[in-house]
Amino acid sequence: MNRKYHYSNNSKAELATCHDDLQIVFNEVIKVTNVDLIIVNGNRSIQEQQDMYAQGRTKPGAIITNVDGVNDIGKHNELPAKAVDICCYVNGKASWEIKHLCYLGGVVMSTANRLYEEGKIKHRIRWGGNWDGDGEIISDQNLVDGPHYEIID
Ligand SMILES: [Zn+2]
């Protein structure tokens, strides 16, 4: 079944803060995916970055970023953002389950590689579930960031 998904206004607003290449990729991904998705975060302010860095260190929760927003400014902190975080939307709610994120990782990377080879985007894209781009995903990563995609400068 060929299901058609559409971004919510919130997803569109987040995607609009991203680099043109990320916008092109994710406007194509939404046409070809069989799992719906949510654009959670494009650009982040320095304050938001510092708050995220505190999680798992000085605040409760798991560590979700190694970018401190003080000495280290990340691709989410640029405007337009060179990074975007995506989760899936399954059975009426957001899903951060690794099986959904890995499905999406395959769709995004194949779409991005095709668009790059067709000359429609200027940069290659990297996925946080496979930073080194080798044949192993998730298990050989220092920090698994399954929702994260970024532009390689
Ligand atoms: Zn991210």
Image (tube, rainbow, N blue to C red):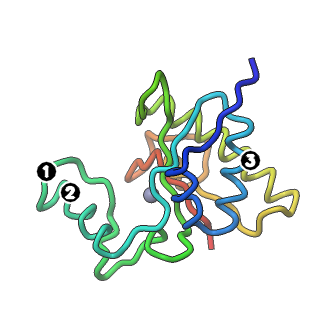
| Mark 1 Cα-neighbour bin, 10 Å: few <14, some 14–19, many ≥20 | few
| Residue at mark 3 | 28
Left or right position of 117 against 37? right
Quadrant placement of the N terminus: top right
Residue in the image at 66% along x and 59% along y: 23
Secondary structure beneath label 3 = helix
Which amino acid is tagged 3? Glu
Figure quarter occupied by ligand 1: bottom left
| Residue at mark 2 | 55
- Gap in Å between the C-alphas at discs 3 and 2? 33 Å
Q: Quadrant of residue 5?
A: top right
- Gap in Å between the C-alphas at discs 1 and 2? 6 Å
Quadrant placement of the C terminus: bottom right
Q: Quadrant of residue 25?
A: bottom right
Furthest toward the bottom, the residue is 71
Residue 29 on image: x %, y %: 69, 44
Residue 39 on image: x %, y %: 52, 49
